[in-house]
Amino acid sequence: MKVKFFILCFLFAWLFLISCNSTKKSTINGPAAKPAKVSSKARVFLRPLKIDRNELVRYAKTFLGTPYKYGSVDPGRGLDCSGFVYLVFKNFKVKPPRVSKDYTYEGVEISLKDARPGDIILFTGSNNKSGIVGHMGIITENKRKLKFIHAASGNDIGVIISDFEGYYKIHFVKVIRVLI
């Protein structure tokens, strides 16, 4: 009985650790990010994808109002941040990483000013000084203001579009490009 209990506790702890938080460090870039570079650790997005940016953003917006559900990729139950991004890209026949930390070494890093709709924006979790990716979204526009769509778990619960300001500026890690 004690062995079963131990195994069950271990599995829950493991699932908790692999969800929307991470254990890898990433470089925190300010608004004037370094020139674009391709990570040598990139896995899924080895080459830019030929997916129409507007179509990707339009599809992502169909999930607006979907409730937040930690660890879920089922829009009927709710979505977490990485589950939302996973579901959007999966619709376009891409199987991206499922966990936000795994995006740390994906794609091509670009500056905020060069960010375009369809690019992925990465943030730290609750500890903004850690540099550890724990939240993410998809950029929807970058004209006068940068906006992104994501599954939020704080005061604004569920899939929403947010301005890149305040809390998000403090927790910003980087923007990655995975689309042509």
Image (tube, rainbow, N blue to C red):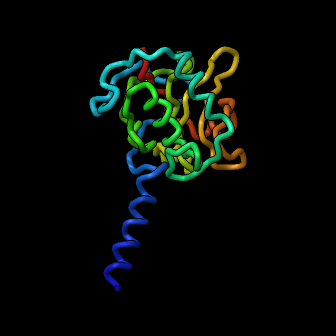
Q: Above or below — where is 176 with respect to 130? A: above
Left or right of 64: which side holds 73? Answer: left
Residue furthest to the right in view is 155
Q: How many marks?
A: 0
Q: Above or below — where is 79 with respect to 41? A: below
Q: Above or below — where is 94 with respect to 1? A: above
Identify which residue is drawn at 62% across, 28% down: 61
Q: Above or below — where is 2 with respect to 25? A: below
Of the pair 74 and 161, the residue shown nearer to us? 74
* Position in image of residue 42 (x %, y %): 31, 31
Q: Quadrant of residue 51?
A: top left
Of the pair 96 and 101, the residue shown nearer to us? 96
Q: Quadrant of the C terminus?
A: top left
* Position in image of residue 142 (x %, y %): 62, 18
Identify which residue is drawn at 46% across, 45% down: 132
* Position in image of residue 157 (x %, y %): 68, 46
Q: Quadrant of residue 35?
A: top left
* Position in image of residue 81 (x %, y %): 54, 42
Residue furthest to the front in view is 76
Identify which residue is drawn at 33% across, 23% down: 38
Residue furthest to the bottom in view is 1
Identify which residue is drawn at 56% across, 17% down: 113
Left or right of 39: which side holds 27? Answer: right
Q: Quadrant of the N terminus?
A: bottom left
